[in-house]
Amino acid sequence: MPIESTPLQNQLLIALPTMSDARFERAVALICQHDGDGALGIVINRPSEYTLGDVLSQVGFDGGDAHLRSQPVLAGGPMHPERGFVVHDGGLHWDSSLRIAEGLYLTTSRDILESMAQGEGPANAIVALGCAGWGTGQLEEELVENSWLTAPSDHELVFALPLDTRWHAAAGRIGVNFIHLADYTGHA
């Protein structure tokens, strides 16, 4: 029996301690798009080995203050690790932008990086290399299998909290404390 799609756009997926896929262990992913064809998300709590300065230099954009250039670039997920994704609050002013929710957008074009380097970018942004993707019904199945919790996204968690606190903080937003959960599953 097919699982009926449930809109999860602008929700956080929080990996349960029992997550069997090492690529998503202790991950928090922002679902940017969810429809009958599947889902696309960005992991928002895993730093990559790069800084924003590295990425700006690689695409040929000089500029940006030291704080901007030192920001970590996130490892957004295992799909398309060569592609950049920018989650931001700056509107649809840039090419290839998708509205996730009111005041929250995903942009995949270089023009936003150029704006950021020139000091004209969005007030808040995270840059990620790669994304997470699920085919039709796949994410719903993973939810039924208790691989993930869901929670509403919020500005502070997406943009402000230190990366290493986001997993516990996201769960805490819905009253879950992972310290009290077992890290295994069983069947009766």
Image: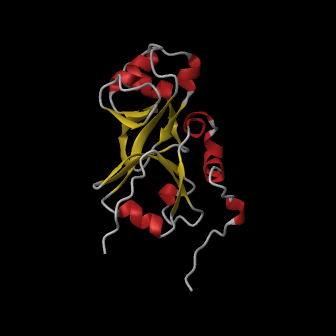
Q: Measured from the top left, where is residue 153 in percent x and y?
A: 53, 44
Write the residue at 65% across / 47% down: 169
Relative side of 146 to 184, left or right:
left
Q: According to the image, what is the colour scheme of the structure?
A: secondary structure
Residue nearest the observer in this picture, 116 or 93? 93
Depicted 154 relative to depicted 39: above or below: above
Residue 2 occupies quadrant? bottom left
Depicted 174 relative to depicted 94: above or below: below
Residue nearest the observer in this picture, 80 or 96? 96
Write the residue at 31% across / 75% down: 1
Question: Looking at the image, which residue sits at the far bottom?
Answer: 188
Q: Measured from the top left, where is residue 117 in percent x and y?
A: 45, 17
Q: Measured from the top left, where is residue 17 in percent x and y?
A: 60, 63
Write the residue at 37% across / 35% down: 99
Q: Identify the image quadrant of the C terminus.
A: bottom right
Residue nearest the observer in this picture, 47 or 115? 115
Depicted 46 relative to depicted 70: above or below: below
Question: Looking at the image, which residue sits at the far right?
Answer: 180
Q: Measured from the top left, where is residue 36 in percent x and y?
A: 29, 56
Residue nearest the observer in this picture, 58 or 137? 137
